[in-house]
Structures are given as C-alpha cells and as structure tokens.
Image: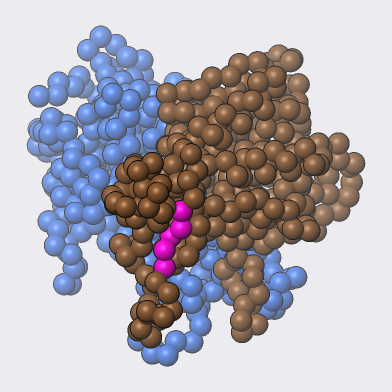
Amino acid sequence: MTPKKTAPSTAPLIGAEQISLLERLSNAVGVSGAEHEVRKIVMAEIKDLADDIKVDALGNVLATKHARQEPGLRVMLAAHMDEVGFMLVDGEEGLYEFAMVGGIDVRQLPGKTVLVGKDHLPGVIGAKPIHHTTPDERRNAISLDSLRIDVGNGNGKKVHPGDRATFATRFQQLGPSLVGKALDNRLGVATLIELLRHAPAHIELLAAFTVQEEVGLRGARVAGYALDPQLAFALDSTPAGDMPSWDGEESPRYNTRLDGGPAIYVADQGTLSDPRLIQHLLQTAEAFGIPCQIRQPGGGGTDAGAIHKQRAGIPVVSVSVPGRYAHTAALVARLDDWQHTLALMFHALDGLTPAILDLQR
Amino acid sequence: MKPLIKKLVEAVGPSGYEGAVRELVKKEVTKLADDVRVDALGNLIVRKGKQRPGGLRIMLSAHMDEIGIIATHIDENGFVRFTTIGGVYPRTLFGGRVQFLNGAFGVISGERLESADRVHSFEKMYIDVGADSKANCPVKIGDLAIFERPMIDLGSRLVAKSMDDRIAVAVLIETLRKLESTPHEVYFVFSTQEEVGTRGATTAAYGIDPDLGIAVDVTGTGDTPKGMRMAVKLGAGPAVKVRDGGMLSDPRVVRWMSDTAEAAKIPYQLEILEAGSTDARAIQLTRAGVPVGCLSIPCRYIHSPSEMVDYSDVVNAVSLLTVLLSNPIQLK
C-alpha cells in the first residue's frame, strides 16, 4: 500500500521507555500455562491505567478502562502473554527429555541454550558433536526423542518433570531492528499497554492479556465470553518470510514483509475478519499515512479465532507486527513496524464509533 | 420455485461475504416474517410465530455462504496466486472461471507439470485475470472470488454452483411462504461461514437458545458410476439425517421427521453420511445442548462448480418441513 499523507498523526511514540518495557517483557519467561512473570510485569504497568483489573480463572489479565462519555462502544483488545517453549518430561542426573509447548520446529533446537524452571537455571539442548555423527545422520533431521536438555549435574536436583523451559536469548536492539525471544507476542502485549495508557475517551476499552494462545487460543476463549464486547481486535506478531531467495525467484509465499507496516488479517485458519473492521483499518492507515500490509491469507491463527465465536458472535480483526524467525530462539522485528502498528491501532480506536456496526458488509 | 433458485445460486457469497445473498433473502422474507434481524456475524435471523403453550422455540438453519478462493499474491506479470475458502478440491478447478467480489473475472490455470496426468496442487495454480502487470491487475491480496457458473435446468434435475447450500436457502424461504400457522416460535436462520467451520450457526444458536434445531443442507449420493458407498439417491425424496462425520441426530428427532413424512405420504430417505457435517452440529453443542436433526437435499458433485439436485426432492423438502412445523411436536 502506498501511504499518502493527509492528516498529522498524534499517536503515542515508542521511545526508550517503551523499548525498555519490551526488553523486560521479552526476557521474562512465560511459556503457555505459566505466564506469571509476564503477568506480573503487565499488572505493575497497568495498575494506574485501568478502572478495573482482574485475573480470571485461567490467568488472563482483564482490564477495563471505562468510557468517559456515554454510551461507550465496548471494544476488546486481546494480546497473548504466553510464548512457545518446552516442558521437562523425564530424566536424571541433569539430563532431561522434554516436550514442546506450542509449535516449534525440532530442527531449530540442537545446541541452543535455555532457561529452566522458575529460577531460570541455565541449560543447553545438547547436540552430538560433528566428530561423532555419520554423514547419513548429518543429512537427516534430528528427532525430538533423541534430544535432551542438559542442566548440568549440580542443578539436576533443582528441576523437575513439569518444569517449563524457554530459549535463553536476551533482548537487543540492533539498529532499526528488535531482536529477542518471545517477541511473538510481547510486541502485542507492549502495544496493548500503550493503548491502555492512551485510551480514547469515547471507548469502553476491554483489554485482555491472554494466556495459552500458543496451545489453542484457550485463554482468549474465556476472556471473550467474560468481556462480551461489541467488537474485538487481536494484537499479535506474525511471521515475515521475506528473506531473499537463493535463486532470485519471486516468492509467492512470504506471509508478510518487514518494513511493510502492521499486517492486517483478512483470512486465516481460524477467522474470517469482519470486512467492516478491515475497511476501517485500511481507511485509517490511508488517512494518517501509516504504511500497512494485508497478511497473505492462509493458515495460522490468532486469539480472534476464539473470540469471534463467543456468545452471539463478535466481529473481529487481527493486526500483527511482522517478525522474521518466529517461534525460534530469536525473532527479528523492526522498530518502525511496531511504531506504525501502535499508530494504526491508536487512530483506529480514536475514529471508531458505533456507526461501524451499521455499515453494509 | 425455479426462478428463486436461479437467483440464489447465481448470487455471489463466499464465506464471510454473504451480503449479496442476505439482501436477496431479506427481500423475499420481509413480508412473510414477524421479525427480521442480522446478528454480529451476519446471520439473517427471521422469526415466524410466537411460542404458545405446547409450542417450541425452533431454529432452522440453511447457510448462505459458498466455497471460494482468496488472493494471496499478485506476481510481477499480474498473475494471481490464491488459497481456498472452505473445502475446495484441486481437481475441480483447472480451466474453471472465477468471479471476484469486486466484479473482476479470471481463469484458473497452472504451472507446467513434469507429468501431464498429475493434478495440480493449489501452490502450482494461478488465476489469469487478463492483466499483464501487477499495476494493472484488478485484484489485490485478500480479495475473494467464487466459481462462476450459471444454472442449467435439465428438467427434473438442476445443476449449478453453490446448490450447497442455496438450495436449502430456497427451501427455507418457500417453507416460510407456505407455513400458514404454527404453534411454535420458528427462527429461520440464513447462516454465515458454514463452509469454514459452522461459525455463523454457532453464534446464532447461542443467541436464539432453541429447544430444537434442524439444519437444512445438501448431502452426497451413492447413485453415480462406481461412486461412494451411500444409500441416498437423487429423486427419492429429501433425506432425514441419522448421522454424519460430526453429529449424531437425536433419535427422537429422526423418528419424528420420518413418522411425519410417512403419515403425510411424502417420500423421504434415511441418510448416513460418513464424512462432513452441517450447522446441526453447531446447534447441538450450544449452551447446555439442543436436540437436533437435519433434512438433507441429495446432491451430486458437491463442492464442484456443477452441483446437481433433483427438483422433486426440493419440493418434497418444503412439504415435509411445512407439515413438521405446522403441528405440535412430541419428541419420543
């Protein structure tokens, strides 16, 4: 999309403070089902930003910022706090078999360092050294069964089956890029915190920091039911597959591209976005000269897939920050794409009125 | 009823974008109904009757949406790559034509394959919309299209795209027209997003909270050369569903529907479908659970651009539904 500037943006900016918050969120450990570290950061950040904050039975943080003028359109914004990771299954003397939590490609794992359990004990996913592998082994992918998390003998007694582990990557800013683990979806979490901070007065803002998205949108399902909004946005991160191809061919499958701005969803495995909300986002982007892209329709899904089917139905759309290498040890996103995502969502909320529900669709 | 069917099957309404079909239906039903509304996911909910003592709150569902495709990429020469909306088979596409929601047309073709007798995977197909560059391509990423095909009337048999499930939309409209009085509060739901997972019916059923649900949809047949193993055939009457891949009909509902057909001397057949499912599944699993059944219109070549039904099955489906809804219901 070619942005043409027509209105000056008054959107909040991402500065050192926001990046530092993202850094803390990225470094926190919050594998699905054990999101407490992330939840703690979120709770501390939003305690003065919302009128009502509660943690529900599954661990979702549900925060309401009331409209300061009546009647407020009830808008839900969802961002999942959890990240993909591992769970120790069995083992002894510091060597543990483990299972995946969420979708991770086993080929990413050998040789990676990890953090294990609530004390973040360092560990490594051991790999057979090249000295000991056969040419045949080197051609084939390693099976999960053959991998172990090695926490070292001394720490063996401090970890237990059921403990979760995640990549040990520490967040960094690299020029225009943000690099870290779990930026899917701490980018969305940080965006949602900023939107709460700058909530427009006419919107009844229902913020849901959700759990267990990576294992099947489980937190969003009950959050959508509880909040019962008139419409909803899911804020997430989506893969960018825009790396140059080795043969110079035009790739028809890239999902999204870095530097293309926020990715607006039309269709994924779980959701057909409401066309009125897609239009609203596209018109907002055009009005404020915010670059944006349509995520390639296809598989995958976001919290929107669970939210829209709650109760008597909820119109939804998803907006994601594009990121390369999602669900690996390090995701690479662009600061500008994040800034544009925040700006798009800020202006989209600011310009949202109940009239959107009366539009032709 | 054939002109109504033609209008409905030639309308454009892929899942999530049922607006054109909804407007057509709205025009037909507004004068016949006690209440008409559109819910949050676009379901058209049409009420007839008010619940009287002994009457039930009944939800009927026929889905307005049809399968289709959605553009994923426009290449530098203006060719459109796509993915599917709903259950589309690669073998039905090659050489077919599509119509985009914005009015653009295109032809489906594909890359040259090593072996000419292989079926193209979706990744190797593209749509040629007559453009020669990205700049003059009338289609953008995220645009939806359906498989364009006019209806043909073969006398007793009708052939069209989207008989699944516009034929049932026609059946519900005609039933509403024929239904003079009912002791029940009947909700005729023209649902959305069935082909992507009965999503519209899920939320419509929650909103209506019915005592009884009946989906009206198409089902496969076993009456073609070396076809699938199935007892249902064209022209033998509408089919009372016993089970499909996602739902077991309430046996009391199956008995009520079959007994009513016998008593009224309306031909019917029993349907056992091994795969697939309908809105009835979504209704059944709503809230604390709902007894459901499904009345099916036998249909050949489902999810191809040329789905075939027998007109007498359609007429008999209207008759059976009308009798079913006109009288008090005792499920036993």
| Above or below: residue A168 compared with residue B37 | below
Q: Is residue A116 left or right of residue B185?
A: right
Tell me the brown chain: A
| Above or below: residue B218 compared with residue B186 | below
Most extreme residue toward the front is A154
Q: Position of residue A123 (x, y in %)?
A: 46, 53
In the rendered image, which quarter is residue B280 located in?
Answer: top left
Q: Position of residue A182 (x, y in %)?
A: 57, 48
**Which residue is painted at 61% across and 30% down in the image?**
A42
- Return the residue nearer the eye: A156 or A192: A156
Report if residue B32 is visible in the image: no
| Above or below: residue A123 compared with residue B194 | below
Q: Position of residue B43 (x, y in %)?
A: 47, 35
**Which residue is painted at 33% across and 25% down in the image?**
B287
**Which residue is painted at 50% across and 22% down in the image?**
A55
* Residue B34 lies in the magenta-colored region: no
In the rendered image, which quarter is residue B211 located in?
Answer: top left
Magenta residue span = A123-127
- Return the residue nearer the eye: A150 or A19: A150
**Which residue is painted at 39% across and 89% down in the image?**
B116
Q: Position of residue A12 (x, y in %)?
A: 81, 36
Predominant SS of the magenta segment: strand
Tell me the blue chain: B
| Above or below: residue A237 compared with residue A75 | below
Report if residue A325 is visible in the image: yes
- Return the residue nearer the eye: A206 or A90: A90
- Return the residue nearer the eye: A314 or B21: A314
In the rendered image, which quarter is residue B202 located in?
Answer: top left
Q: Is residue A215 left or right of residue B264?
A: right
The color scheme shown is by chain
* Residue A125 lies in the magenta-colored region: yes
